[in-house]
Image (tube, rainbow, N blue to C red):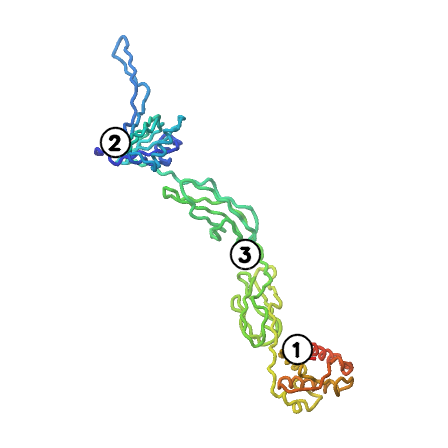
Amino acid sequence: MAASTAAGSTLAISVGVPATQDGTGYAALTYTDIANLEKIGTVGASYAKTEFQPFQGPKQKYKGSADYGSLAPTLAHDEADAGQSILRTAADDETNRLYAFALTYPTGAKRYFQARVFGYPETIDGADTVLMATPTIEISTKVVKTGAGTPTPTPAPAFSGNPTITPTSGDTSTTYTATDPTITNGVITSRAWLIGTTVIGTGPSIVPGVGNDGQLSRRVTGVGDDGSTITRTSGAVTVASVAAALKALTVSSSNATTGTAISSTISGLTSGSSVALTGAGAAGLSIAGAVITGTPTTAGLVNIVETLAGASNSPRLSPGVITVAAAAPTPSNTYANSTQVYANNSSFSPDLADVEQRLLALGGSYSQYRVDYGTGPNTATGDSVNAALVKLQNWIAAIEADRAVTQDNTLAGNTSLLAGNAAWKARFQALETRFTALGVA
């Protein structure tokens, strides 16, 4: 190698000391460069000479105590420089604490040693001079030399152990938690849960789930500062299989009306299952994925049947998740002329059920309309059930045609007329309740 100037040389200090007195031990420390160096000084051992002159023979010369040198660097003082700050701290330290130094030549060769700093005097000269400092660094250990062509190797990464899993037994519904090791001289780059060789998760905990029975293990992988990759795997935990249990299902919209399209999303489905609709209200509806869509055609309840092979309770019925109500019928114009529709009192078209549906569609206050269930206002005798029904239907027709009906009698005064037919009586009383709700006296 050719000779070199000192230009580019650096001196760095560390607050630590090496674990071993060799290039590897020193290289493992963290150093901070000392800035603004003008001169560094002399480094290297010199030995005291011990002489002995025997009576016979030449004078013997022996190496005495080694002096590893003393540095007296000169540098431009900088309060903000981190390296100089550590140097001043070492100078102010009244103990015999050693600090590690790394002297680097322009060729890349290094000289490592430990020393004590015996002072940091600062020189303030003329106005046109730089504020200087001349610390004294007394080397107190053997100087360790590393050549430019032999860089100190980067320590290999290492894990503190293997991952562990708790609990150490369970089934596919159990929550398993990993405790991962730490890594030195590197970083952990990936974590994985495996059933056999198949990765099923990466988080700190996992529930394997249906179908993931077998040997569960935890694997961690790291990359070292030297670029190498290391892996550690836990001992295997046996995961027993368990049959899935289907849950009760719910839907986002639980009410529907015949003739009106709906879209309702199912919640609670188990992965891999199939579903079907049953019940009177299911006519006109279908399922795609987890969404029920369509236009129901029949009033009634809609049930969902979920099926999954191997499930402990398959198939499972979720009854009545949707209630389909019949839409109110549209009133007919023929009600305005009751004499033509109800000429035959033994036969009614439409019947009382239709009248009830029409009443449901009424709103507001209809106190101006009156109907007589008997032969005259406020009399206890009156029409037959059939005749009363005709008058009731005429009353509704009058409301719809906005025709005045002036006679007034409540149902309560005519209950004797209905005593022979409990079913008709109950239906009339239900209608009377609706009249009251509409504000009809």
Which circle marks residue 387 in the picture?
none
**Residue 384, placed above or below residue 207:** below
Residue 270's image quarter?
bottom right
Question: Which residue is situated farthest in the front direction here?
Answer: 127
C-alpha gap between disc 3 and disc 2: 85 Å
Q: Report the front residue among 235 and 10.
A: 10
State which quarter of the image contains the C terminus. bottom right
Mark 3 or 2: the one toward you:
2
**Residue at the image point whose x is 31% and y is 25% from the top:** 68
**Residue 386, placed above or below residue 2:** below
Q: Secondary structure at mark 3?
A: loop
Mark 2 or 1: the one toward you:
2
Q: Specify whether 180 is left or right of 331.
A: left
Crowding at dot 1, Cα within 10 Å, few <14 / some 14-19 / many 20+, comes out as: some
x and y, in percent, of residue 321 in the image? 60, 67
Which residue matches tag 2?
A: 126
Q: Report the front residue among 400 and 217.
A: 400
Which residue matches tag 3?
A: 210
Q: Earlier in the sequence, mark 3 or mark 2?
A: 2
Tag 2: amino acid:
Gly
Which residue matches tag 1?
A: 438
Q: Is residue 24 visible?
A: no
Crowding at dot 3, Cα within 10 Å, few <14 / some 14-19 / many 20+, comes out as: some
**Residue at the image point whose x is 46% and y is 47% from the top:** 219
**CB of mark 3 within 8 Å of CB of mark 1?**
no
**Residue at the image point whose x is 61% and y is 81% from the top:** 329
C-alpha gap between disc 2 and disc 1: 109 Å
